[in-house]
Amino acid sequence: MAHLPEPLAGLISELSKLPGVGPRSAERIALHLVQSGRADTRLLADAIVNASEKIQPCQICGALTEIQPCGICGDARRDPSLICVVERAVDILSLEKSGIYHGRYHVLGGKISPVDGIGPEDLRIAQLEQRLVEQPGIQEIIIALGSDVEGDATSYYLAKRLAPKGVKVTRLAQGMAVGASLEYADELTLGRAIEGRRALES
Amino acid sequence: MEFIPGFHLFLGQNAQGKTNLLEAVYLLSTLRSFRGAGHAQMVRQGQEGFFAGGTVVEQGNHEVKFYWSSRKKSLGLDGRPVRKLSEYFGLIQAVVFCTEDLQLIKGAASVRRRFLDLLLAQTQPGYLALLQRFARAVRARNALLKQPRPDAPSLEGFTREMLASGGQVMQCRRDLMPQLAPLAVDAYQRIAPDAEALRLEYQPSVKADFEVELAQSRQRERVLRSTLVGPHRDELRLLLNDRSAAQYGSEGQKRTLAIALKMAQAEYLTRRRGAPPILLIDDVMGELDARRRGGFLPLLEQARHARGQVFMTCTEENWPRELSRDLIRWEVKTGTVKPGAANPAR
């Protein structure tokens, strides 16, 4: 790379640490920023600082929130007997978009992955158990983790660990995608779909 | 460059880039090198990465592009990135014959497992995903076993995953044997007619019950800190007159056997798909005497009848003249390819 002024090089280096931003994009964004109006860049900088200072994990569920507890935990219309366990805070957004779920959430913060050195103690499992103690109305834990090897193993782990607590532990159904045809489904998916079949209501 | 169906012969001195062409086809088929080179080793000196691309002509055309550098890897099919390797595998089916095949006999069990796995991945849509799942579960499990005090329920979680996917991997390998073994035996007979009887024996690491045997190995696992039972320890035994080919076979027998296994692979792919795979023959013909080469001919004839493609490299001096009917010749010199002289009228 040609000689860049130090502040510009510093900006590029910071930007390229962002997820999904490669060196090329970092350079483009940085050049755009230094050439755009000072008011615009000030707005952006303020927005970044503001958001990073105000957004915190919810002390109860771990969702990203500005207020404590978060909007979902604080919403009395939400079903307090249901807790849906997700891997990351963004997973809540996906489930919320479906509009079908009216219980509360619990963010695990990852999956058990021995290869990456992540064990159960690195996840927010103790906090989940704590909730079971503090909120006696909880009847069902719905595990909504991905179905890769780590997701499946973590689901199994949770089911084992929560079993003695006297709550029902369920897991999202797996199998055919809505609107999919059998022809294009892979064998693993079809196998799970067969295992998870259910009676047609009539 | 366009290669019409038929028998393409690449002629040239050593180190001119003949094998490179075969590598490119094999790379697009399996995303690996058949010489066992890592991707980084396949980059030309002084370059950042490499690219291979082609159009697969079958029912409809498919555009494939593979780019690799240490910073960026991409695989494209018809202009779109391929997200799951298991969706790509099997599009281009190729079988390579090369000197490294000798490792199938002499090498570690992992070479023979890879042979079975490649064949299954090329023919069974779900197999690659299954194998990847199994490998991942084993890796996680081994990482746990390396910890000073592995967390028992976590271990159990990954053990379940490993048992489920591993069980299916073994089943697939077991089911393959009765179809593959007779093809290999036939091929061996063809290239070494009055020779000893060949037998292929799938010898799974699990004798009867994966779960039970894994549990029995728990003590040793704890000491050795890794998973000791499972399809990652399977063996494919190769026996000539009931004796291990690796231990008791002569050099010539081993070479013949390696070619027989590859012929069986080609034959199996042909039967499964109804069309022959692309045959890549890298300098192995020269090693064979005329009689053994003769045994090879039916496979080439079959490819010709089915309008398949055969790519073969040779140095000028040793190319087998009995194969010369309908050859399409190319000359390879310092990395460039041009149509060879004296192509017969077609």
Image (spheres, rainbow, N blue to C red):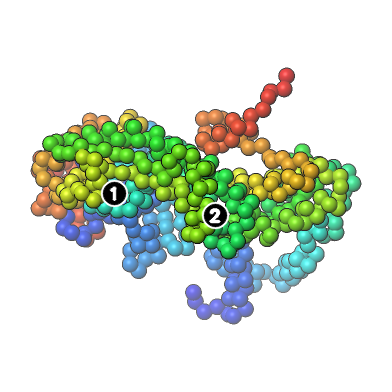
Asked if residue B208 can be seen in this view, the reply is yes
Marks 1/2 in contact by CB < 8 Å: the verdict is: no
Name above or below for residue A193 compared with residue B288.
Answer: above
* A184 left or right of B27 in image: right
Question: Do marks 1 and 2 share a chain?
Answer: yes
The residue that appears at 85% across and 56% down in the rendered structure is A69
* Displayed quadrant of residue B43: bottom left
**Which of the chains bears the disc numbered 2?**
B
Name above or below for residue B146 compared with residue B235.
Answer: below
Res B140 label: 2
* A148 left or right of B49 in image: right
Mark 2 surroundings within 10 Å by alpha-carbon count, few (fewer than 14), some (14 through 19), many (20 or more): many
Q: x%, y% of residue A68? A: 85, 59
Mark 1 surroundings within 10 Å by alpha-carbon count, few (fewer than 14), some (14 through 19), many (20 or more): many
* Displayed quadrant of residue A138: top right
The residue that appears at 30% across and 53% down in the rendered structure is B107
Res B104 label: 1
Q: x%, y% of residue A14? A: 62, 71
| Mark 1 residue element | helix
| Mark 2 residue element | helix
Asked if residue B136 can be seen in this view, the reply is no
Q: Nearer the viewer, residue B169 or B67?
A: B169
- Look at label 2 and name its amino acid: Ala
* B48 left or right of A194 in image: left
Name above or below for residue A88 compared with residue A100.
Answer: below
